[in-house]
Image (cartoon, helix red, strand yellow):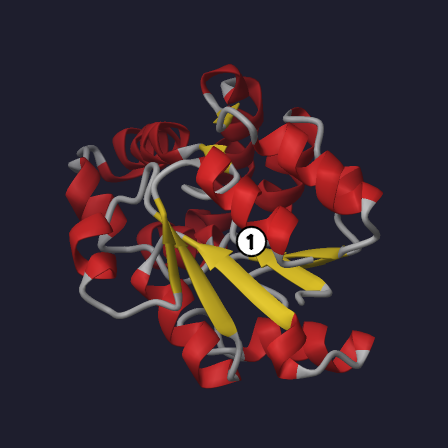
Amino acid sequence: MFKGIIFDIDGTLTSTNQLIFDSFNHIAKKYLHKTFSDQEIIALFGPPEEVILRQWCGDNYDEASKDYFDYYRSHHEIAKLYPGINELLEILKDRDVHLSVFTGKGRMSSIITLEELGVIDYFDMIVTGDEVANHKPAPDGIISIIEKYNFKKDEVLMIGDSVGDFKASRDAGVKIASALWDSYAADKVKQLGSDYYFNTVDELKEFLIQNI
């Protein structure tokens, strides 16, 4: 029976990939005078946005960072929760399940997204990519949650959509539920041998109701 559920954000709780692509290309156009394809931006995923922006913009980092997050917040209307996520989170909290977030996103964008979509108060702990020594696929964030709340590893389930989520879970010694409803790497994830696969939020909800 799971006592702690750890969620990824992008592609798991929220449909935010297009907003991320648009935000990076807003900066690329202004500072690099070019744009990137979706796949080129996906290839950058792993470290938080600040790392990528610093690599891109160098001495202009402070200005570019402000521009990025201003754009990210002001265009957040294109981001959505996946259907059923709000209901799922309510069910889990009503049953006193400990809910956490472990994301590769930086703190700033994570808080913007969770606030703008109205779900930040569901989570007891939020661990972001700029708050760990090693970002995903390293397991640091999962381990910090386990240690803070003194969970046994078999009491914890990580829910995420990426190869990085799978690797982090395996290295942390917890089970992984791979969300396939909007995974940009669904074909690769399907080959990994996750503990559980879910094609819809409703499938995940029914599973969790039976296992909490």
Task: Give the side of residue 27 with respect to residue 160, left or right.
Answer: left
The count of marks equals 1
Could you say where residue 43 lies in the image, as x and y percent from the top left?
22, 55
177 in relation to 82, above or below: below
Could you say where residue 76 lies in the image, as x and y percent from the top left?
53, 22
Front in this rendered view, residue 45 or 180: 180
At 44% from the left and 55% from the top, the residue drawn is 160
Q: Report if residue 126 is visible in the image.
A: yes
210 in relation to 39, above or below: below
Front in this rendered view, residue 204 or 56: 204
Front in this rendered view, residue 150 or 111: 150
Could you say where residue 165 lies in the image, as x and y percent from the top left?
41, 64
Front in this rendered view, residue 188 or 34: 188
At 70% from the left and 77% from the top, the residue drawn is 146
Task: Give the side of residue 162 with respect to residue 35, left or right.
Answer: right
Task: Give the side of residue 31 with respect to residue 84, left or right.
Answer: left
Could you say where residue 81 lies in the image, as x and y percent from the top left?
53, 27
11 in relation to 45, above or below: above
Decide: few, some or many residues near mark 1? Use Cα within 10 Å; few <14, some 14-19, many ≥20: some
The residue to which callout 1 is attached is: 106
Please name the amino acid that badge 1 sits on.
Gly
Residue extending farthest top = 77
For the N terminus, the image quarter is bottom right
211 in relation to 195, above or below: above
In what element is the residue under mark 1? loop
At 53% from the left and 77% from the top, the residue drawn is 174
Task: Give the side of residue 90 with respect to residue 14, left or right.
Answer: right
At 28% from the left and 36% from the top, the residue drawn is 28
For the C terminus, the image quarter is bottom right
